[in-house]
Image (tube, rainbow, N blue to C red):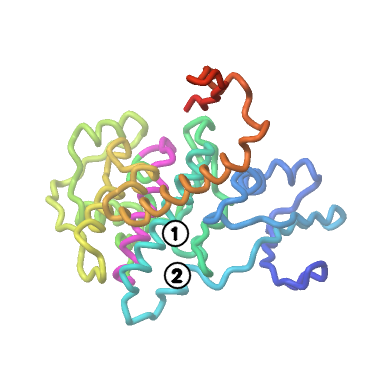
Amino acid sequence: ILSLRDGKYYACKCMKQHFKSIEQVNNLSEIQALRRLSPHPNILMLHEVVFDKKAGCLSLICELMDMNIYELIKGRRKPLPEKKIKNYMYQLCKSLDHIHRNGIFHRDVKPENILIKNTLKLADFGSCRTIYSKQPYTEYISTRWYRAPECLLTNGYYSYKMDIWSAGCVFYEITSFQPLFPGSNDLDQISKIHDVIGTPANRTLNKFKQSTILNFHFPFKKGKGIPPPVHNLSAKGLTLLYAMIKYDPDERIAAHQALQHPYFQELWAADTQALATHKKVRLLENTVGQVPLHLWQISKGSQGEVIFTWKH
């Protein structure tokens, strides 16, 4: 849609649900999440909430992006350059690190919900929950192909690590243009996961069995490994991918750990350097009367002068 206020184009998401009051609108988890998470360079920006009380209609006005990851790779023949793959995955991990640090997990990370323009942004927080909300989660969540084992094998006992599994599936998909685990139903989904990474150890399955009424037993499979072709994915990238699809969520890499993985070494170093420079500039700007006196060490020099040293 075109805004007459600033002459810019925005994306408009019309909600299917009917709303009775502004209180109901403000309690919507998607709106609460976007307000809490913004601004962040890798989270879709919510600009405005438009509520028609008479009609009960709600629209979310967000920044307009070029396309989603699914549209980027659909029908594509030429592999994405390694640098682009790495940049996309780094930005996706940054978005997940940000939401997890803010106590939110997305629950529906998939190519259609990852938007790109000049940068990558995570979108569609309609399924999100807070990390502190009470388990079990009863709603049907996550698109099957990107659903973590703990979502498939327990009665709603899962956490933020499910987002990492989904991101790992996306990682494979942008290197191969094929879904990693294209299950036709939940049982087939588990079977396809075992085909790739093998049947988990009994201790892992026993963890899951404590959180379900299901009684499951799986035939032993060694696992054939990540299926080819994977284009422009280095050995370090493959190591990270395996870390993201660890069967046991307790052993699965977290977003903040993924950012510091050797695969992202150059990007992490550049980010760290930029942050250090930014802090240094801010410090120089704020030295006059901005830092409380108790944060300074006061001493006398050899000539009797007063020396102020900032306590790091």
* Residue 296 screen position, x and y as percent: 55, 23
- N-term-proximal mark, 1 vs 2: 2
Q: Amino acid at mark 1?
A: Lys
Q: Please name the residue shown 38% across and 48% down the image.
A: 164
Q: 184 or 176: nearer the eye?
A: 176
Q: Please name the residue shown 26% across and 70% down the image.
A: 232
| SS class, disc 1 | loop
Query: 312 left or right of 174?
Result: right
Query: 2 left or right of 292?
Result: right
134, above or below 159, in the image: above
Checking the image for residue 110, the label placed there is 1
What segment is highlighted magenta in the picture?
A: 154-177
* Residue 21 screen position, x and y as percent: 81, 45
Q: 194 or 4: nearer the eye?
A: 4
Q: Amino acid at mark 2?
A: Tyr
Q: Please name the residue shown 32% across and 39% down the image.
A: 249
Q: Quadrant of the N terminus?
A: bottom right
Mark 1 in CB contact with mark 2 (< 8 angstroms): yes
* Residue 168 screen position, x and y as percent: 34, 55
Residue 211: within the magenta? no
* Residue 115 screen position, x and y as percent: 52, 65
Badge 1 density bin: few <14, some 14–19, many ≥20, Cα 10 Å: many
Checking the image for residue 70, the label placed there is 2
